[in-house]
Amino acid sequence: DSNDYVRTAAETTVGLIMSNLSGHGVKLVMPAVLEAFNEPEWRTKQASIHMLGSMSHCAPKQLASCLPKVVPKLTEAFSDTHPKVKSSAEEALEEICKVIKNPEISSISSTLLSALTDPANATLRALEALISTEFLHAIDAPSLSIIIPVVHRGLRDRTATTKRYAALISGNICTMVNDPRDFVPYLPVLLPDLKSTLLDPIPDVRSISAKSLGSLTRGLGEATFPDLRPWLVETLTSDEAGSVERSGAAQGLTEILVAGGAHLTENVMLKEILPLKSHPKAGTREGVLWVLTFLPSALGQAYSSLIDSSLPALLSGLADDNEVVREVALRAGRVLVKSHGKAHKDKILPSLEDGLRNEDYRIRVASLTLLGDLLSMLGGTKVAKGNADTQDDIRQAERAQAQIALVLGNETRKRVLSSLYLSRSDTAAIVRQSAVQVWKTVVSVTPRTLREILSELVDQIVSALASGDPERTQVAGRCLGDIVQKLGDQVLPEIIPVLRDSLYRGDEHTRQGVCVGLSEVISCSSKEQIIKFLDIIVKVVQDALCDDNDLVRKMASSCFQSLHQVVGARTLDEVVPALLVGMESTNETAKARALKGMTGILSVRSHELLPYIIPRLLKAPLTISHADALGSISAATSDTI
């Protein structure tokens, strides 16, 4: 109205009406007042603002229901072009501030009002004031109506600090209100902003936003957010999302699951998340591994029931074709080792040991990295860098070795160190380098440790030699040669009998492996060392040369060549006469075996042997067996003949 007295009387009347309105009455009045706010006439808009401000006179219950709609409209008025509309909005907010019962909020209400009237410059100061305030009283509905717009503006700010503070306050408010239901009307405003900050490029902002979502879920119940978990899983597996978005979604999902309890977590992980580990899309596999990155430390000891289920997903991720997936898998593995390695070493160690024997070198490298983390943590040290040959490094490794023996027990320690030493002879250079670094971390004096673990190491070497896998056989042979070089006379009495027994007891793969291992032992030993065991070695080589399997005979020929290079002509004197005797045997099986052995030797030493053998076979009278032998020898040495 144009008359001041009429307007004043109307304002008084509105205040009285508002103070006596029921909840239903507020619902009836609110649409008309909000509609008037949108009118272009400034007086109508101003009157609407006065009415909105008068709602501060409502009863507390009605006030709580109307403020979530009132305050946003009042803050909207600050951008109006008419100065009286602006001043009316400020007065209306001051009216609302007068009914704030929380003394802590009352003390900083002017700072909060400044943030509402000048959000660009005062929002950060208001958020800092909220964070630094120690709350001794519950936050009431009027306080909430002033805080939420400030937080809403902070979550949309460009600076990381402001977003971080706003996200932190969002999560904490729920625990400080009298009735959590007072907070529910503000969720449609805050939730989209928290989703946005959850996918922020800055890790700290993502982390705090995730914790805030967890706090809200814990305070209000997951039923209040029916669409939140499906949205997080969708973001986690989306093709359009990048690593940052998947990381944020995984953090958010982790906090929500933790808030829901161990039963919900286990149910969702086993039925929804872990089955996606073999999904054809790399992004989906990456999302699964991001969850495994954040869940172990967030869930604590309750995660122990999921370790067995999650390890296959980790190991398959370590061997993934996609580099990003492999990186996330390694990160997840390191988190698991750090958070649960000590308590659940019995579950984690076997998987890492299996990883050391995997045919994919990338899994072997990653397994070594994780094994290094675990052993250094158990030993109270750090994985060695560089040469690690200083006195401090050696003393540190000595302490670590003693601690590891105490924690793991002697048998497990021997098994783990044996697997680690085998990896030092790997076919891939990067695996060998990693193995050496981990070895130096936990072993101070290599020869002494080798003597301690020798029996277990030899068992593992023989097992690898007998595996039938050419790569593992080669690695085991190299390792055997390396041990002989380091320990010499101390190790030969133990290794050679084991190899001999394996040759006679094993299958064709074992026999092939024994030949490879024996060849390495001979090559890495001195003449004096070999001569001490020459009787055993000659017998083993001779029997391998006469084997029924072609590959065994071929490898035995290489072994014979190595023996000849070390010992010289004596090798021929020891082996050839026995084979010649066998070739003249009346037993057809023995004759055939001896002929196979002779042919194998001739394939590598024909120049030395032919002048010795041919005259014997041509001696009259020429028998059928000699004629057969000449035919086989001619086929094996046609070029030399």
Image (tube, rainbow, N blue to C red):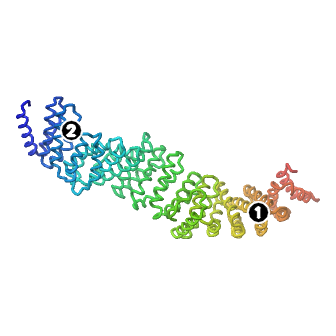
Tag 1 secondary structure: helix
Q: Position of residue 174 (x, y in %)?
A: 26, 52
The CA span between labels 1 and 2 is 95 Å
Give the left or right position of residue 423, taking residue 600 as reference: left
Which dot marks residue 283? none
Residue 144: horizontal and vertical position, in percent? 22, 48
Position above or below: 415 against 152: below
On screen, residue 373 above or below 640: below
Which numbered dot is residue 541? 1
Residue at 45 percent of width and 61 percent of height: 340
The quadrant in which residue 601 appears is bottom right
User: For the residue marked with disc 2, what is the amino acid?
Assistant: Lys
If the image is split into quadrants, where does the N terminus sit?
Answer: top left
Marks 1, 2: nearer the viewer: 2
User: To which quarter of the image does residue 84 belong?
Assistant: top left
Q: Nearer the viewer, residue 448 or 333?
A: 448
Residue at numbered disc 2 = 73
Sequence-wise first label, 1 or 2 = 2
